[in-house]
Image (cartoon, grey):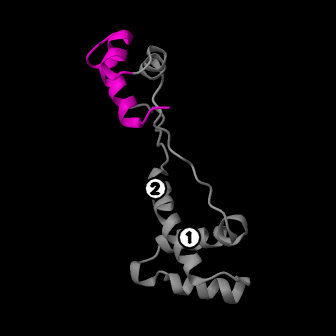
Amino acid sequence: MLAMPKVDYIKHLREEEDLSINEIARKTGCNWRTVKKYADGESFKETLKFTKRGMMYEERFGQIVDDWLEEDMKLKRKERRTNKKIFEDLSNDHDFRGSYRTVCEYIQHRKPHLKAAKVERHERLEHPPGEA
């Protein structure tokens, strides 16, 4: 297997400079089968997907915090719950045994997703044609 800079160079020679497989093989010093595999293959740039685990994601606590964050987005900035207040409410009312840092990390991870979902929500308005 080749390093990614070499693979990118092979793809560049094939697509940009329009060289043949044999010319690329001679230029890079690789076997022509290897060059063909990387030059004509698809891009390898994949994004890794990590699934979050832990009590905030697997148990009901994450959904509770999400609901609170959505409620708080509708309030004025000064009236919103802080991370500390969310942690205290979870600990006192819902028997949360996790740490404050766990709650902070979850909130830091979820806030951008909730804001993006809020922006994407919209309703299409349709007006039926009327008579003049």
The label on residue 114 is none
Describe the element under mark 1 as helix, strand or loop: helix
Above/below status of 108 relative to 35: below
Quarter of the image where one finds residue 29: top left
Amino acid type, callout 2:
Ala
**Magenta stretch holds residue 132:** no
- Which residue is identified by label 2? 116
Kindly identify the amino acid type of the residue bearing the numbered disc 1: Tyr
Please report the residue visible at 51 percent of the width from the left and 61 percent of the height from the top.
Answer: 114
- Residue 11 magenta-highlighted: yes
Q: Residues within 10 Å of mark 2 (few under 14, many from 20)?
A: few
Q: CA distance from mark 1 to mark 2?
A: 16 Å
SS category of the residue bearing label 2: helix
Dot label at residue 106: 1
Residue 84, image x, y percentages: 53, 86
Determine crowd level at label 1: few under 14, some 14-19, many 20+ residues with C-alpha closer than 10 A. some
